[in-house]
Image: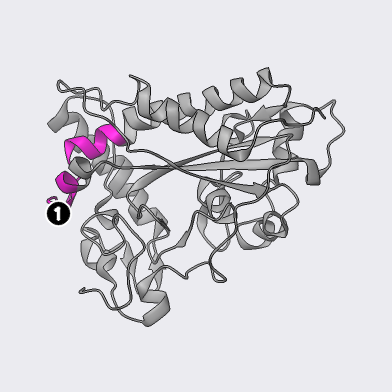
Amino acid sequence: MKKFSKSADSIESIIKEFVETSPENSLKNSANDRAFDSPLIGFSSGADPLYQDFKTHVGPFHWTPKEALAQAFPDLLLEAEEISVISWVLPQTKATRKDNRNEALYPSESWARARIFGEEFNVKVRKHLVEYLMREGHEAVAPVFLPNWKIEQSERFTLASTWSERHAAYASGLGTFGLCDGLITAKGKAMRLGSVAARIKIAPTPRPYMDHNAYCLFYSTGKCGKCIERCPVQAVSKNGHDKLKCFSHTKIDGGDYVKSHYGFDGYGCGLCQTGVPCESRIPKVNQEL
């Protein structure tokens, strides 16, 4: 493996510069509004025990970074210790969050655009980073691009993927899970995530938490539950997140609504990510609910 001569700061700069300067970071509306604010970036080791734990917590189908990278480069002899995961948070803009905060049943147009056109940009972020690392001599892949990536049936979570961007971000020190399953980050829960696994050693980002629900007020204090109130179809309760009910509303009903009201093929909801204490930050225990 070629020794990496640049620091984690250099990789952060590559991602941040692309997000902050690319014209593709757009909602593709008439005003050409930005889709996302400046990103947060974290790193984790391919040898981190958490990735093996995810096979128990999420399902045996969930890949480790080594398993993901090996699918893209089957002829490589890989060791987990020489692999790193680079994960990032793309925060929704203040304007998009405000728009969606005012909704009560379906997503605002800007939120739906961020879900579709913003994610198209997130795809470009992944490709941009992979291309950069490959040019530097480091094999890299975005696991969600792998042909075998799919949604599986999970005994614990009903639906789960073979590579979870949220779990990669959690392992990379970027946030913890909330009652509605969203990841609460330093930029809040209103965001999108991406990651790349690469054959490169980077110092892992420290995880400033010991528990996977540490930032959620409901789990940490027994109070809050604002995401329960925000869900228009009662898919969030004190018992957690009903993924099937959420999927039906977000993808099917939400898809019909976006097409008929906003004029493009899309879907979304995101009400549990806005109008809540964790919308744009890690909530404080003593803040007004």
Quarter occupied by residue 82? top right
Indicate left or right for 5 with 238 as reference: right
Residue type at numbered disc 1: Ala
Residue 62 visible to an observer of this rendering: no
* Residue bounds of the magenta highlight: 98-114
Q: Residue at x 37, y 38 (%)?
A: 38
Quick one: label 1, few (<14), some, or many (20+) residues within 10 Å?
few
Q: Position of residue 189 (x, y in %)?
A: 35, 54
The residue pinned by badge 1 equals: 104
Can you say whether 77 is above or below 239 in the image? above
Q: Residue at x 32, y 38 (%)?
A: 37
**Quadrant showing the C terminus:** bottom left
Q: Which quadrant of the structure image shows residue 119? A: top left
SS for dot 1? loop
Which x, y percent locates residue 208?
54, 65
Q: Is residue 216 above or below residue 86?
A: below
Q: Position of residue 239 (x, y in %)?
A: 40, 73
14 to the left or right of 109: right
User: Of all residues shown, which one is farthest toward the bottom?
Assistant: 222
What residue do we see at 58% from left, 52% from top? 172
> Can I make out residue 187 in this image?
yes
| Side of 130 relative to 183 (left or right) | right
In the rendered structure, does residue 106 fall within the stretch colored magenta?
yes
